[in-house]
Amino acid sequence: MSDFEIHTLGCGSARPSLRHQPSSTVVKHRGNLFMVDCGEGAQLGFMRQRLSFSRLRHIFLTHLHGDHVFGLPGLIGTLALNGSGGGVTIHTFADGERQLRAIFDYFCRDTPFEINFNVIKPEDAVILETKSLTVRTVKLKHRVPAVGFVFEEKIGERHINPSMCERYEVPKSWMRRLKGGEDYIMEDGTVIPNNILTFDPTPPKSYAHISDTVYLPALAEKIKGVDLLFHETTYLNQHLAMAAPRGHSTAAQAAMVARDAGAGRLLTGHYSSRYDDDSLFLKEASEIFPNVVLNREGLVTPIS
Amino acid sequence: MSDFEIHTLGCGSARPSLRHQPSSTVVKHRGNLFMVDCGEGAQLGFMRQRLSFSRLRHIFLTHLHGDHVFGLPGLIGTLALNGSGGGVTIHTFADGERQLRAIFDYFCRDTPFEINFNVIKPEDAVILETKSLTVRTVKLKHRVPAVGFVFEEKIGERHINPSMCERYEVPKSWMRRLKGGEDYIMEDGTVIPNNILTFDPTPPKSYAHISDTVYLPALAEKIKGVDLLFHETTYLNQHLAMAAPRGHSTAAQAAMVARDAGAGRLLTGHYSSRYDDDSLFLKEASEIFPNVVLNREGLVTPIS
Protein backbone atom coordinates (compact mmCIF):
# COMPACT_ATOMS: atom_id res chain seq x y z
CA MET A 1 0.00 0.00 0.00
CA SER A 2 1.36 3.35 -1.04
CA ASP A 3 1.61 5.95 1.72
CA PHE A 4 0.44 8.68 -0.68
CA GLU A 5 -2.56 7.90 -2.80
CA ILE A 6 -5.64 9.49 -4.32
CA HIS A 7 -9.12 8.01 -3.81
CA THR A 8 -11.76 9.16 -6.28
CA LEU A 9 -15.21 9.35 -4.69
CA GLY A 10 -16.88 11.31 -7.49
CA CYS A 11 -15.60 12.47 -10.89
CA GLY A 12 -18.78 13.68 -12.57
CA SER A 13 -19.82 17.28 -13.12
CA ALA A 14 -22.88 19.21 -12.00
CA ARG A 15 -25.66 17.35 -13.74
CA PRO A 16 -25.87 14.05 -11.89
CA SER A 17 -26.10 10.79 -13.74
CA LEU A 18 -26.30 7.15 -12.86
CA ARG A 19 -22.71 6.75 -14.11
CA HIS A 20 -20.83 9.41 -12.14
CA GLN A 21 -21.08 11.06 -8.74
CA PRO A 22 -20.43 14.77 -8.16
CA SER A 23 -16.93 15.90 -7.24
CA SER A 24 -15.06 14.50 -4.30
CA THR A 25 -11.52 13.23 -3.87
CA VAL A 26 -9.63 11.97 -0.84
CA VAL A 27 -5.88 12.42 -0.55
CA LYS A 28 -4.47 9.73 1.74
CA HIS A 29 -1.02 10.51 3.07
CA ARG A 30 0.62 8.31 5.71
CA GLY A 31 -2.80 7.27 7.01
CA ASN A 32 -4.16 10.83 7.23
CA LEU A 33 -7.09 11.76 5.03
CA PHE A 34 -7.59 15.11 3.27
CA MET A 35 -10.79 15.59 1.32
CA VAL A 36 -10.93 17.88 -1.69
CA ASP A 37 -14.53 18.90 -2.47
CA CYS A 38 -17.54 17.12 -1.10
CA GLY A 39 -20.36 16.67 -3.61
CA GLU A 40 -23.62 15.03 -2.61
CA GLY A 41 -23.05 11.37 -1.75
CA ALA A 42 -19.34 11.79 -0.93
CA GLN A 43 -19.80 10.09 2.43
CA LEU A 44 -21.16 7.00 0.68
CA GLY A 45 -18.13 6.83 -1.58
CA PHE A 46 -15.99 7.29 1.51
CA MET A 47 -17.61 4.28 3.16
CA ARG A 48 -17.49 2.18 0.00
CA GLN A 49 -13.72 2.67 -0.10
CA ARG A 50 -13.53 1.69 3.57
CA LEU A 51 -11.84 4.95 4.52
CA SER A 52 -11.97 5.84 8.19
CA PHE A 53 -14.01 8.90 9.19
CA SER A 54 -11.81 9.31 12.24
CA ARG A 55 -8.75 9.96 10.05
CA LEU A 56 -10.40 12.86 8.22
CA ARG A 57 -9.26 16.20 9.66
CA HIS A 58 -9.12 18.57 6.68
CA ILE A 59 -11.63 19.34 3.95
CA PHE A 60 -10.68 21.67 1.10
CA LEU A 61 -13.24 23.32 -1.15
CA THR A 62 -12.11 24.42 -4.60
CA HIS A 63 -15.12 26.71 -5.05
CA LEU A 64 -18.69 27.19 -3.90
CA HIS A 65 -20.81 25.40 -6.46
CA GLY A 66 -23.31 22.87 -5.17
CA ASP A 67 -21.81 19.87 -6.95
CA HIS A 68 -18.63 20.41 -4.92
CA VAL A 69 -20.28 21.21 -1.58
CA PHE A 70 -23.69 19.60 -1.05
CA GLY A 71 -22.31 16.43 0.54
CA LEU A 72 -20.74 18.42 3.37
CA PRO A 73 -23.71 18.85 5.76
CA GLY A 74 -24.41 15.12 5.63
CA LEU A 75 -20.76 14.26 6.11
CA ILE A 76 -20.53 16.53 9.16
CA GLY A 77 -23.69 14.89 10.52
CA THR A 78 -22.12 11.48 10.08
CA LEU A 79 -18.86 12.54 11.72
CA ALA A 80 -20.99 13.78 14.62
CA LEU A 81 -22.91 10.50 14.91
CA ASN A 82 -19.67 8.56 14.78
CA GLY A 83 -18.37 10.65 17.64
CA SER A 84 -15.35 11.64 15.59
CA GLY A 85 -13.16 13.09 18.29
CA GLY A 86 -10.64 15.56 17.05
CA GLY A 87 -12.53 18.15 15.05
CA VAL A 88 -12.31 19.00 11.41
CA THR A 89 -11.04 22.05 9.54
CA ILE A 90 -12.75 23.28 6.40
CA HIS A 91 -10.57 25.33 4.09
CA THR A 92 -12.83 27.60 2.07
CA PHE A 93 -13.47 31.20 1.07
CA ALA A 94 -15.12 33.65 3.49
CA ASP A 95 -18.44 33.11 1.71
CA GLY A 96 -18.12 29.38 2.26
CA GLU A 97 -17.60 29.82 5.98
CA ARG A 98 -20.66 32.08 6.19
CA GLN A 99 -22.92 29.76 4.23
CA LEU A 100 -21.76 26.56 5.87
CA ARG A 101 -21.83 27.91 9.41
CA ALA A 102 -25.47 28.87 8.89
CA ILE A 103 -26.30 25.32 7.78
CA PHE A 104 -24.29 23.68 10.55
CA ASP A 105 -25.69 26.01 13.22
CA TYR A 106 -29.20 24.86 12.42
CA PHE A 107 -28.83 21.27 11.24
CA CYS A 108 -25.70 20.09 13.06
CA ARG A 109 -26.28 21.66 16.47
CA ASP A 110 -25.27 18.53 18.36
CA THR A 111 -21.89 18.10 16.71
CA PRO A 112 -19.61 16.96 19.56
CA PHE A 113 -16.44 18.40 18.04
CA GLU A 114 -15.15 21.70 16.72
CA ILE A 115 -15.83 22.62 13.12
CA ASN A 116 -13.00 25.00 12.32
CA PHE A 117 -12.69 27.16 9.25
CA ASN A 118 -9.49 28.25 7.61
CA VAL A 119 -10.54 31.12 5.39
CA ILE A 120 -8.58 31.05 2.16
CA LYS A 121 -8.50 33.45 -0.77
CA PRO A 122 -8.56 32.92 -4.52
CA GLU A 123 -4.81 33.42 -4.86
CA ASP A 124 -1.53 31.51 -4.74
CA ALA A 125 -0.62 30.83 -1.10
CA VAL A 126 0.51 28.18 1.35
CA ILE A 127 -2.57 27.35 3.43
CA LEU A 128 -1.52 24.37 5.54
CA GLU A 129 1.71 22.95 6.89
CA THR A 130 1.71 19.60 8.62
CA LYS A 131 4.74 17.66 9.80
CA SER A 132 5.06 15.95 6.46
CA LEU A 133 3.00 17.94 3.96
CA THR A 134 2.59 21.44 2.60
CA VAL A 135 -0.70 22.36 0.98
CA ARG A 136 -0.90 25.45 -1.20
CA THR A 137 -3.54 27.04 -3.38
CA VAL A 138 -3.18 28.09 -6.98
CA LYS A 139 -5.65 30.57 -8.39
CA LEU A 140 -7.93 29.20 -11.10
CA LYS A 141 -10.42 30.85 -13.42
CA HIS A 142 -14.01 29.69 -13.26
CA ARG A 143 -17.45 31.32 -13.21
CA VAL A 144 -16.95 31.97 -9.48
CA PRO A 145 -13.72 32.34 -7.47
CA ALA A 146 -11.85 29.03 -7.52
CA VAL A 147 -8.54 27.54 -6.49
CA GLY A 148 -6.66 24.32 -7.04
CA PHE A 149 -4.74 22.61 -4.24
CA VAL A 150 -1.17 21.35 -4.43
CA PHE A 151 -0.07 18.76 -1.85
CA GLU A 152 3.70 18.54 -1.53
CA GLU A 153 5.55 16.16 0.71
CA LYS A 154 8.31 17.69 2.79
CA ILE A 155 11.74 16.22 2.44
CA GLY A 156 11.79 13.38 4.92
CA GLU A 157 14.50 12.12 7.23
CA ARG A 158 17.56 10.30 5.95
CA HIS A 159 17.27 6.51 6.08
CA ILE A 160 19.60 4.55 8.36
CA ASN A 161 22.03 2.14 6.69
CA PRO A 162 21.91 -0.70 9.24
CA SER A 163 24.98 -2.62 8.09
CA MET A 164 27.22 0.45 8.13
CA CYS A 165 25.90 1.51 11.54
CA GLU A 166 26.69 -1.96 12.80
CA ARG A 167 30.19 -1.85 11.36
CA TYR A 168 30.95 1.44 13.18
CA GLU A 169 29.06 0.25 16.28
CA VAL A 170 26.85 3.37 16.32
CA PRO A 171 24.75 3.27 19.51
CA LYS A 172 20.92 3.37 19.19
CA SER A 173 20.84 6.74 20.95
CA TRP A 174 22.48 8.31 17.86
CA MET A 175 19.89 7.17 15.33
CA ARG A 176 17.67 10.26 15.55
CA ARG A 177 20.65 12.55 15.01
CA LEU A 178 21.82 10.50 12.03
CA LYS A 179 18.36 10.72 10.47
CA GLY A 180 18.60 14.48 10.91
CA GLY A 181 21.88 14.57 8.95
CA GLU A 182 24.50 14.82 11.71
CA ASP A 183 27.90 13.17 11.34
CA TYR A 184 28.73 10.49 13.91
CA ILE A 185 31.58 11.28 16.31
CA MET A 186 33.12 8.15 17.83
CA GLU A 187 34.35 8.15 21.43
CA ASP A 188 37.96 8.60 20.25
CA GLY A 189 36.90 11.69 18.28
CA THR A 190 36.90 10.07 14.83
CA VAL A 191 34.23 11.60 12.62
CA ILE A 192 32.17 9.27 10.39
CA PRO A 193 30.41 11.36 7.74
CA ASN A 194 26.63 11.04 7.81
CA ASN A 195 26.38 9.91 4.18
CA ILE A 196 28.37 6.76 5.00
CA LEU A 197 25.85 5.76 7.68
CA THR A 198 22.62 6.79 5.96
CA PHE A 199 20.84 6.77 2.60
CA ASP A 200 19.21 9.80 1.01
CA PRO A 201 15.63 10.51 2.05
CA THR A 202 12.83 9.24 -0.21
CA PRO A 203 12.31 11.92 -2.86
CA PRO A 204 9.24 13.95 -1.88
CA LYS A 205 6.14 13.48 -4.03
CA SER A 206 3.44 15.89 -5.00
CA TYR A 207 -0.18 15.98 -6.11
CA ALA A 208 -2.04 18.85 -7.76
CA HIS A 209 -5.84 19.00 -7.82
CA ILE A 210 -7.05 21.42 -10.49
CA SER A 211 -10.84 21.82 -10.80
CA ASP A 212 -12.92 23.74 -12.01
CA THR A 213 -11.07 26.00 -14.42
CA VAL A 214 -10.69 27.24 -17.94
CA TYR A 215 -7.44 26.26 -19.66
CA LEU A 216 -4.67 28.28 -18.02
CA PRO A 217 -1.34 27.84 -19.85
CA ALA A 218 0.48 29.72 -17.07
CA LEU A 219 -0.57 27.08 -14.57
CA ALA A 220 2.07 24.62 -15.80
CA GLU A 221 4.88 26.74 -14.38
CA LYS A 222 3.23 26.78 -10.93
CA ILE A 223 2.99 23.01 -10.68
CA LYS A 224 6.25 22.19 -12.44
CA GLY A 225 7.30 18.56 -11.99
CA VAL A 226 4.20 17.48 -10.09
CA ASP A 227 4.06 13.70 -9.79
CA LEU A 228 0.30 13.32 -10.25
CA LEU A 229 -1.92 16.01 -11.74
CA PHE A 230 -5.67 15.80 -11.50
CA HIS A 231 -6.92 18.33 -14.03
CA GLU A 232 -10.58 18.62 -14.90
CA THR A 233 -11.55 17.30 -18.34
CA THR A 234 -15.17 18.41 -18.46
CA TYR A 235 -15.38 18.47 -22.25
CA LEU A 236 -13.93 16.84 -25.34
CA ASN A 237 -12.44 18.94 -28.10
CA GLN A 238 -15.66 18.67 -30.10
CA HIS A 239 -17.19 21.04 -27.52
CA LEU A 240 -14.16 23.32 -27.21
CA ALA A 241 -16.31 26.37 -27.89
CA MET A 242 -18.35 25.66 -24.74
CA ALA A 243 -15.40 25.12 -22.44
CA ALA A 244 -14.11 28.63 -21.73
CA PRO A 245 -17.52 30.37 -21.52
CA ARG A 246 -18.60 27.82 -18.95
CA GLY A 247 -15.34 27.99 -17.05
CA HIS A 248 -14.10 24.53 -17.96
CA SER A 249 -11.37 22.71 -19.88
CA THR A 250 -11.20 19.97 -22.47
CA ALA A 251 -9.25 16.74 -22.13
CA ALA A 252 -6.73 18.04 -24.67
CA GLN A 253 -6.21 21.24 -22.66
CA ALA A 254 -5.67 19.26 -19.46
CA ALA A 255 -3.07 17.20 -21.32
CA MET A 256 -1.30 20.35 -22.48
CA VAL A 257 -1.02 21.52 -18.88
CA ALA A 258 0.33 18.10 -17.85
CA ARG A 259 2.84 18.12 -20.71
CA ASP A 260 3.99 21.68 -20.08
CA ALA A 261 4.29 21.05 -16.33
CA GLY A 262 6.35 17.91 -16.92
CA ALA A 263 3.87 16.03 -14.75
CA GLY A 264 4.42 12.37 -13.97
CA ARG A 265 0.84 11.39 -14.77
CA LEU A 266 -2.46 13.06 -15.56
CA LEU A 267 -5.70 11.97 -13.87
CA THR A 268 -8.89 12.92 -15.75
CA GLY A 269 -12.32 13.83 -14.35
CA HIS A 270 -15.25 16.19 -13.80
CA TYR A 271 -16.79 14.62 -16.88
CA SER A 272 -19.78 16.29 -18.49
CA SER A 273 -22.76 13.94 -18.39
CA ARG A 274 -23.31 14.47 -22.13
CA TYR A 275 -20.73 11.79 -22.97
CA ASP A 276 -21.48 8.08 -22.68
CA ASP A 277 -17.98 6.80 -23.37
CA ASP A 278 -15.32 7.92 -20.88
CA SER A 279 -12.55 6.30 -22.89
CA LEU A 280 -12.77 9.25 -25.29
CA PHE A 281 -11.24 11.48 -22.59
CA LEU A 282 -8.31 9.07 -22.31
CA LYS A 283 -7.89 8.92 -26.08
CA GLU A 284 -7.98 12.68 -26.57
CA ALA A 285 -5.58 13.44 -23.72
CA SER A 286 -3.16 10.64 -24.61
CA GLU A 287 -2.56 12.12 -28.04
CA ILE A 288 -0.89 15.07 -26.31
CA PHE A 289 0.48 13.56 -23.11
CA PRO A 290 1.20 9.83 -22.81
CA ASN A 291 0.71 9.06 -19.12
CA VAL A 292 -3.00 9.47 -18.62
CA VAL A 293 -5.02 7.66 -15.94
CA LEU A 294 -8.74 7.43 -16.75
CA ASN A 295 -10.62 8.36 -13.60
CA ARG A 296 -13.70 6.62 -12.23
CA GLU A 297 -15.48 6.37 -8.88
CA GLY A 298 -13.64 3.99 -6.58
CA LEU A 299 -10.30 4.37 -8.32
CA VAL A 300 -7.24 4.48 -6.07
CA THR A 301 -4.20 6.09 -7.71
CA PRO A 302 -0.91 5.68 -5.87
CA ILE A 303 1.62 8.48 -6.27
CA SER A 304 4.91 6.80 -7.00
CA MET B 1 -49.27 0.02 -13.61
CA SER B 2 -51.21 1.29 -10.64
CA ASP B 3 -52.20 4.96 -10.76
CA PHE B 4 -51.41 5.37 -7.04
CA GLU B 5 -48.13 3.92 -5.86
CA ILE B 6 -45.32 4.54 -3.42
CA HIS B 7 -41.67 4.58 -4.52
CA THR B 8 -39.13 4.13 -1.78
CA LEU B 9 -35.91 6.06 -2.48
CA GLY B 10 -34.45 5.74 1.02
CA CYS B 11 -35.62 3.89 4.13
CA GLY B 12 -32.63 4.14 6.43
CA SER B 13 -32.26 6.42 9.44
CA ALA B 14 -29.74 9.13 10.24
CA ARG B 15 -26.51 7.19 10.39
CA PRO B 16 -25.81 6.25 6.79
CA SER B 17 -24.80 2.77 5.82
CA LEU B 18 -23.98 0.93 2.64
CA ARG B 19 -27.32 -0.91 2.96
CA HIS B 20 -29.82 1.94 3.28
CA GLN B 21 -30.18 5.51 2.06
CA PRO B 22 -31.58 8.33 4.21
CA SER B 23 -35.30 9.06 4.08
CA SER B 24 -37.09 9.80 0.86
CA THR B 25 -40.33 8.55 -0.63
CA VAL B 26 -42.20 9.46 -3.80
CA VAL B 27 -45.97 9.25 -3.99
CA LYS B 28 -47.01 8.75 -7.60
CA HIS B 29 -50.63 9.52 -8.27
CA ARG B 30 -52.02 9.56 -11.81
CA GLY B 31 -48.61 10.46 -13.20
CA ASN B 32 -47.97 13.29 -10.74
CA LEU B 33 -45.11 12.96 -8.29
CA PHE B 34 -45.13 14.11 -4.65
CA MET B 35 -41.92 13.69 -2.67
CA VAL B 36 -41.98 13.15 1.06
CA ASP B 37 -38.61 14.01 2.62
CA CYS B 38 -35.43 14.35 0.65
CA GLY B 39 -32.40 12.81 2.33
CA GLU B 40 -28.97 13.01 0.73
CA GLY B 41 -28.88 11.02 -2.48
CA ALA B 42 -32.66 11.16 -3.08
CA GLN B 43 -32.16 12.45 -6.61
CA LEU B 44 -30.08 9.39 -7.44
CA GLY B 45 -32.83 7.08 -6.21
CA PHE B 46 -35.26 9.17 -8.23
CA MET B 47 -33.23 8.59 -11.39
CA ARG B 48 -32.69 4.91 -10.64
CA GLN B 49 -36.46 4.44 -10.53
CA ARG B 50 -36.74 6.32 -13.83
CA LEU B 51 -39.10 8.87 -12.33
CA SER B 52 -39.46 12.08 -14.30
CA PHE B 53 -38.13 15.27 -12.68
CA SER B 54 -40.63 17.28 -14.73
CA ARG B 55 -43.56 15.58 -12.96
CA LEU B 56 -42.36 16.61 -9.51
CA ARG B 57 -44.24 19.67 -8.26
CA HIS B 58 -44.58 19.15 -4.50
CA ILE B 59 -42.05 18.26 -1.82
CA PHE B 60 -43.20 17.65 1.75
CA LEU B 61 -40.82 17.70 4.70
CA THR B 62 -41.88 15.81 7.83
CA HIS B 63 -39.34 17.63 10.00
CA LEU B 64 -36.04 19.47 9.81
CA HIS B 65 -33.42 16.86 10.53
CA GLY B 66 -30.60 16.53 8.04
CA ASP B 67 -31.32 12.93 7.07
CA HIS B 68 -34.70 14.11 5.75
CA VAL B 69 -33.51 17.33 4.09
CA PHE B 70 -29.91 17.26 2.87
CA GLY B 71 -30.78 15.94 -0.60
CA LEU B 72 -32.92 18.99 -1.34
CA PRO B 73 -30.30 21.54 -2.48
CA GLY B 74 -28.87 19.03 -4.95
CA LEU B 75 -32.33 18.08 -6.19
CA ILE B 76 -33.24 21.73 -6.77
CA GLY B 77 -29.94 22.19 -8.62
CA THR B 78 -30.77 19.24 -10.83
CA LEU B 79 -34.30 20.48 -11.52
CA ALA B 80 -32.69 23.79 -12.52
CA LEU B 81 -30.19 22.12 -14.88
CA ASN B 82 -32.99 20.06 -16.39
CA GLY B 83 -34.91 23.26 -17.04
CA SER B 84 -37.90 21.88 -15.15
CA GLY B 85 -40.52 24.34 -16.23
CA GLY B 86 -43.35 24.66 -13.82
CA GLY B 87 -41.87 25.42 -10.43
CA VAL B 88 -41.94 23.41 -7.26
CA THR B 89 -43.63 23.93 -3.90
CA ILE B 90 -41.92 22.89 -0.68
CA HIS B 91 -44.26 22.24 2.22
CA THR B 92 -42.33 22.80 5.43
CA PHE B 93 -42.32 24.70 8.71
CA ALA B 94 -41.37 28.39 8.86
CA ASP B 95 -37.89 27.41 10.00
CA GLY B 96 -37.53 25.19 6.96
CA GLU B 97 -38.41 28.02 4.63
CA ARG B 98 -35.88 30.29 6.31
CA GLN B 99 -33.06 27.75 6.23
CA LEU B 100 -33.70 26.50 2.73
CA ARG B 101 -34.19 29.94 1.19
CA ALA B 102 -30.78 30.94 2.52
CA ILE B 103 -29.20 27.89 0.88
CA PHE B 104 -31.07 28.32 -2.40
CA ASP B 105 -30.36 32.06 -2.53
CA TYR B 106 -26.65 31.40 -2.47
CA PHE B 107 -26.21 28.05 -4.21
CA CYS B 108 -29.20 27.92 -6.57
CA ARG B 109 -29.22 31.50 -7.83
CA ASP B 110 -29.75 30.50 -11.45
CA THR B 111 -32.85 28.38 -10.87
CA PRO B 112 -35.07 29.17 -13.87
CA PHE B 113 -38.33 28.47 -12.03
CA GLU B 114 -40.13 29.54 -8.90
CA ILE B 115 -39.34 27.77 -5.64
CA ASN B 116 -42.50 28.28 -3.62
CA PHE B 117 -42.96 27.55 0.03
CA ASN B 118 -46.17 26.50 1.69
CA VAL B 119 -45.52 27.10 5.38
CA ILE B 120 -47.16 24.39 7.45
CA LYS B 121 -47.47 23.96 11.19
CA PRO B 122 -47.01 20.98 13.47
CA GLU B 123 -50.73 20.36 13.75
CA ASP B 124 -53.58 18.49 12.06
CA ALA B 125 -54.63 20.41 8.95
CA VAL B 126 -55.43 20.12 5.25
CA ILE B 127 -52.43 21.60 3.45
CA LEU B 128 -53.05 20.85 -0.21
CA GLU B 129 -56.05 20.19 -2.44
CA THR B 130 -55.54 19.13 -6.03
CA LYS B 131 -58.22 18.03 -8.45
CA SER B 132 -57.93 14.45 -7.32
CA LEU B 133 -56.09 14.44 -4.00
CA THR B 134 -56.26 15.97 -0.54
CA VAL B 135 -53.08 16.11 1.52
CA ARG B 136 -53.30 16.72 5.24
CA THR B 137 -50.86 16.79 8.11
CA VAL B 138 -51.12 14.89 11.37
CA LYS B 139 -49.08 16.08 14.31
CA LEU B 140 -46.37 13.69 15.44
CA LYS B 141 -44.05 13.67 18.43
CA HIS B 142 -40.33 13.69 17.78
CA ARG B 143 -37.29 15.50 19.20
CA VAL B 144 -38.20 18.47 16.98
CA PRO B 145 -41.59 19.51 15.56
CA ALA B 146 -42.78 16.85 13.12
CA VAL B 147 -45.82 15.90 11.07
CA GLY B 148 -47.00 12.95 9.06
CA PHE B 149 -48.76 13.40 5.71
CA VAL B 150 -51.99 11.69 4.65
CA PHE B 151 -52.76 11.52 0.93
CA GLU B 152 -56.43 10.86 0.23
CA GLU B 153 -57.98 10.45 -3.18
CA LYS B 154 -61.14 12.41 -3.79
CA ILE B 155 -64.21 10.47 -4.86
CA GLY B 156 -63.96 10.26 -8.61
CA GLU B 157 -66.61 10.45 -11.32
CA ARG B 158 -69.13 7.67 -11.88
CA HIS B 159 -68.13 5.23 -14.62
CA ILE B 160 -70.25 5.00 -17.77
CA ASN B 161 -71.99 1.67 -18.41
CA PRO B 162 -71.56 1.54 -22.20
CA SER B 163 -74.07 -1.22 -22.93
CA MET B 164 -76.90 0.43 -20.95
CA CYS B 165 -76.13 3.83 -22.52
CA GLU B 166 -76.35 2.18 -25.92
CA ARG B 167 -79.65 0.50 -25.05
CA TYR B 168 -81.20 3.86 -24.08
CA GLU B 169 -79.47 5.61 -26.97
CA VAL B 170 -77.93 8.25 -24.66
CA PRO B 171 -76.19 10.85 -26.85
CA LYS B 172 -72.44 11.49 -26.30
CA SER B 173 -73.19 15.04 -25.18
CA TRP B 174 -74.78 13.62 -22.01
CA MET B 175 -71.77 11.60 -20.85
CA ARG B 176 -70.20 14.32 -18.71
CA ARG B 177 -73.52 14.89 -16.87
CA LEU B 178 -73.95 11.15 -16.31
CA LYS B 179 -70.45 10.93 -14.83
CA GLY B 180 -71.44 13.76 -12.51
CA GLY B 181 -74.46 11.78 -11.27
CA GLU B 182 -77.38 13.31 -13.21
CA ASP B 183 -80.34 11.21 -14.32
CA TYR B 184 -80.88 11.01 -18.07
CA ILE B 185 -84.05 12.62 -19.41
CA MET B 186 -85.11 11.24 -22.77
CA GLU B 187 -86.64 13.48 -25.41
CA ASP B 188 -90.12 12.20 -24.49
CA GLY B 189 -89.50 13.17 -20.86
CA THR B 190 -88.84 9.65 -19.56
CA VAL B 191 -86.30 9.68 -16.73
CA ILE B 192 -83.62 6.98 -16.66
CA PRO B 193 -82.04 6.94 -13.21
CA ASN B 194 -78.31 7.56 -13.23
CA ASN B 195 -77.47 4.31 -11.43
CA ILE B 196 -78.88 2.31 -14.37
CA LEU B 197 -76.50 4.04 -16.81
CA THR B 198 -73.37 4.21 -14.65
CA PHE B 199 -71.28 2.23 -12.19
CA ASP B 200 -70.14 3.54 -8.85
CA PRO B 201 -66.83 5.49 -8.84
CA THR B 202 -63.68 3.62 -7.94
CA PRO B 203 -63.45 3.70 -4.15
CA PRO B 204 -60.93 6.38 -3.18
CA LYS B 205 -57.65 5.15 -1.74
CA SER B 206 -55.38 6.66 0.85
CA TYR B 207 -51.76 6.64 1.99
CA ALA B 208 -50.37 7.82 5.31
CA HIS B 209 -46.68 8.62 5.77
CA ILE B 210 -45.74 8.63 9.46
CA SER B 211 -42.09 9.43 10.26
CA ASP B 212 -40.36 10.30 12.65
CA THR B 213 -42.39 9.78 15.80
CA VAL B 214 -42.71 8.07 19.11
CA TYR B 215 -45.55 5.57 19.37
CA LEU B 216 -48.80 7.56 19.41
CA PRO B 217 -51.82 5.32 20.14
CA ALA B 218 -54.20 8.21 19.34
CA LEU B 219 -52.84 8.37 15.80
CA ALA B 220 -54.85 5.31 14.73
CA GLU B 221 -58.12 7.22 14.99
CA LYS B 222 -56.80 9.98 12.73
CA ILE B 223 -55.84 7.63 9.91
CA LYS B 224 -58.74 5.19 10.31
CA GLY B 225 -59.11 2.83 7.36
CA VAL B 226 -56.02 4.03 5.50
CA ASP B 227 -55.15 1.68 2.64
CA LEU B 228 -51.38 1.83 3.00
CA LEU B 229 -49.61 3.05 6.11
CA PHE B 230 -45.91 3.82 6.09
CA HIS B 231 -44.98 4.01 9.77
CA GLU B 232 -41.39 4.29 10.88
CA THR B 233 -39.91 1.18 12.47
CA THR B 234 -36.57 2.54 13.63
CA TYR B 235 -36.09 -0.05 16.36
CA LEU B 236 -36.93 -3.62 17.28
CA ASN B 237 -38.58 -4.41 20.58
CA GLN B 238 -35.22 -5.36 22.07
CA HIS B 239 -34.38 -1.64 22.03
CA LEU B 240 -37.83 -0.46 23.18
CA ALA B 241 -36.25 1.56 25.98
CA MET B 242 -34.39 3.69 23.45
CA ALA B 243 -37.34 4.36 21.18
CA ALA B 244 -39.35 7.00 23.05
CA PRO B 245 -36.38 9.00 24.41
CA ARG B 246 -35.01 9.29 20.88
CA GLY B 247 -38.39 10.11 19.39
CA HIS B 248 -38.85 6.86 17.50
CA SER B 249 -41.02 3.73 17.35
CA THR B 250 -40.43 0.01 17.24
CA ALA B 251 -41.75 -2.34 14.55
CA ALA B 252 -44.26 -3.71 17.07
CA GLN B 253 -45.53 -0.22 17.86
CA ALA B 254 -45.94 0.57 14.16
CA ALA B 255 -47.94 -2.64 13.81
CA MET B 256 -50.18 -1.66 16.71
CA VAL B 257 -50.97 1.63 14.96
CA ALA B 258 -51.71 -0.26 11.71
CA ARG B 259 -53.94 -2.74 13.55
CA ASP B 260 -55.83 -0.08 15.53
CA ALA B 261 -56.29 2.07 12.41
CA GLY B 262 -57.65 -0.89 10.45
CA ALA B 263 -55.03 -0.17 7.81
CA GLY B 264 -54.92 -2.24 4.64
CA ARG B 265 -51.17 -2.78 4.78
CA LEU B 266 -48.19 -1.55 6.78
CA LEU B 267 -44.95 -0.46 5.08
CA THR B 268 -41.88 -0.52 7.33
CA GLY B 269 -38.81 1.74 7.27
CA HIS B 270 -36.45 4.32 8.78
CA TYR B 271 -34.38 1.40 9.97
CA SER B 272 -31.67 1.97 12.52
CA SER B 273 -28.30 1.00 11.06
CA ARG B 274 -27.58 -1.15 14.12
CA TYR B 275 -29.48 -4.08 12.60
CA ASP B 276 -28.06 -6.25 9.85
CA ASP B 277 -31.17 -8.30 9.14
CA ASP B 278 -34.19 -6.29 7.97
CA SER B 279 -36.43 -9.35 8.02
CA LEU B 280 -36.57 -8.99 11.80
CA PHE B 281 -38.73 -5.86 11.34
CA LEU B 282 -41.15 -7.88 9.22
CA LYS B 283 -41.22 -10.70 11.72
CA GLU B 284 -41.83 -8.47 14.73
CA ALA B 285 -44.55 -6.41 13.06
CA SER B 286 -46.30 -9.43 11.53
CA GLU B 287 -46.88 -10.94 14.94
CA ILE B 288 -49.25 -8.04 15.68
CA PHE B 289 -50.56 -7.08 12.24
CA PRO B 290 -50.55 -9.56 9.34
CA ASN B 291 -50.23 -7.38 6.22
CA VAL B 292 -46.72 -6.04 6.46
CA VAL B 293 -44.61 -4.99 3.47
CA LEU B 294 -40.87 -4.99 4.16
CA ASN B 295 -39.47 -1.78 2.75
CA ARG B 296 -36.23 -1.40 0.81
CA GLU B 297 -34.71 1.12 -1.61
CA GLY B 298 -36.24 0.76 -5.05
CA LEU B 299 -39.45 -0.85 -3.81
CA VAL B 300 -42.65 0.21 -5.57
CA THR B 301 -45.79 -0.44 -3.51
CA PRO B 302 -49.08 -0.07 -5.38
CA ILE B 303 -52.04 1.07 -3.31
CA SER B 304 -54.85 -1.25 -4.27
Image: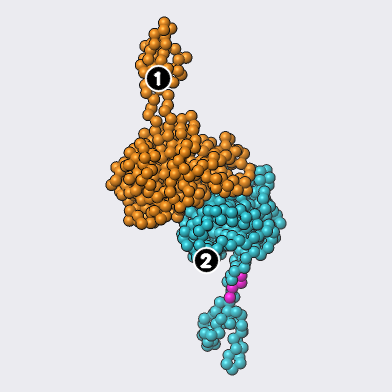
Chain colours: A orange, B cyan
The picture quadrant where one finds residue A111 is: top right
Prevalent SS, magenta region: loop
Q: CA distance from mark 1 to mark 2?
A: 70 Å
- What subunit carries mark 2? B
Q: Which residue is mark 1?
A: A160
Q: Is residue B216 left or right of residue B11?
A: right
What's the amino acid at mark 2?
Gly
Return the residue nearer the eye: A126 or A48: A126
| B260 to the left or right of B23 | right
* Residue B283 appearing in the image: no
Q: Residue A9: x, y in percent?
A: 45, 44
x, y percentage for residue B224?
Answer: 67, 62
In the rendered structure, which amino acid carries the disc numbered 1? Ile
Where is mark 2, residue-wise?
B86
Q: Where the C terminus of chain B falls, by quadrant?
A: bottom right
Q: Magenta residues, as a range?
A: B153-157
Label 1: chain? A
Q: Is residue B284 left or right of residue A275?
A: right
The disc label shown at residue A10, or none: none
Instruction: Tell me: A286 left or right of B143.
Output: left
* Circles 1 and 2 on the same subunit: no
User: Is any atom of residue A224 visible in this view?
Assistant: yes
At 61% from the left edge and 61% from the top edge, which residue is drawn?
A: B117
Q: Do the residues bearing badges 1 and 2 touch, measured as CB atoms within 8 Å? A: no
